[in-house]
Amino acid sequence: MTHVHSKYADFESLREQAVALRRAGLSRRQIRDRLHVDNNDILNRLLQGEPAPEWTKRPNAKDDLREKARELRLQGWTYDRIQVELGCSKGSISLWVRDLPKPERREATEQARLAARKRWEHELAVRDEQRRQTKETAAAEIGIMSERDLFIAGVALYWAEGAKDKPYDRRENVLFVNSDPGVIKLYLAWLLMLGVERERISYRLMIHATADVEGAKRYWADLVGVDVSRFQKTTIKKHNPKTVRKNVGDTYHGCLVVRVSQGADLYRRIEGWWGGMLSGITEQPASGKV
């Protein structure tokens, strides 16, 4: 005891040295070794009130997690949700957010609704991915279309969507109306493959009065590669207030009417081709595969 007392008898002088060393930027270990102070309690008293130099402070790797946890807690998240989101322990979360107000407790029915909505959103995402993969695989099965592929597709497309002659109303016109840009592109490619001159093809917009008429004309003109001035007079369809239209908004461009002038002979050939396709149908293969 006599040795210890003599070693630390002049405490104030020793403290002055310790403070000076601390302010010079030395660490606790360096001060301890320099002054030969082996007792931690004494060292604490010598350095009391003196902050550690910046270089001795190690950055806390969890600072970002702590801030995120506090942010989520303020949004009303539970400990369980924060733990799943950040991957840290509930004990740490509790220490980080204990000064924050507790979120209002939701009714069990509301929690069930939120859980059901999350499950449904996940299910929709899975379905969207399956839908995308199926379409991508199917598109690859088509590959590059030959002229005969395009020829057959065009005949079937016209007979499904184009104007047709009736025994009671003889109009052998090649007239095609559609709102699908992909259908229009395939139909025009078919006409050009048949040797129909571009000068014989005319265009007209058919659209509801409440839509952006001029914007729709520009849309179709860009699609078919002609100037808007080539378009004939627009057909405006009046809106029936008793019906609820779903084809509205920025994606609604009306229908494009495509007419081939002097098309009686072409129409007769189209009707003949269609009849030939019907008579050329053979028995369906047992496998039913394409």
Image (cartoon, grey):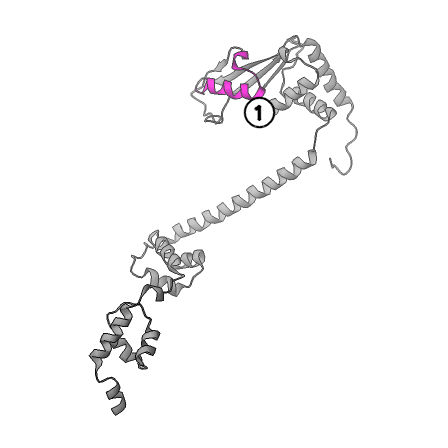
Question: In which quadrant is the C terminus drawn?
Answer: top right
Residue highlighted by disc 1: 181
Question: In which quadrant is the N terminus drawn?
Answer: bottom left
Query: Does the magenta stretch mainly form a helix, a strand or a loop?
Result: helix
Vertical position of residue 38 compared to residue 148: above or below: below
Residue 124, given in percent of the width and then of the height, sits at 52, 43
Vertical position of residue 259 compared to residue 3: above or below: above
Vertical position of residue 71 compared to residue 46: above or below: above
Residue 221 in magenta stretch: yes
- In this view, the residue in front, 1 or 132, is 1
Residue 192 figure quarter: top right
Count the labels in the image: 1
Q: Residues within 10 Å of mark 1 (few under 14, many from 20)?
A: some
Residue 3, given in percent of the width and then of the height, sits at 27, 90
Residue name at image x 25 percent, y 71 percent: 20
Residue 93 in magenta stretch: no
Residue name at image x 22 percent, y 85 percent: 9
Q: Amino acid at mark 1?
A: Pro
Q: Secondary structure at mark 1?
A: helix
Residue 159, given in percent of the width and then of the height, sits at 67, 20
Can residue 78 be seen from the camera position used here? no
Residue 57 figure quarter: bottom left
Can residue 111 be seen from the camera position used here? yes
Residue name at image x 74 percent, y 18 percent: 273
Vertical position of residue 59 compared to residue 254: above or below: below
Residue 23, given in percent of the width and then of the height, sits at 27, 68
Region rendered in magenta: 210-230
Left or right: residue 124 compared with residue 60: right
Residue name at image x 79 percent, y 28 percent: 282
Left or right: residue 50 compared with residue 151: left
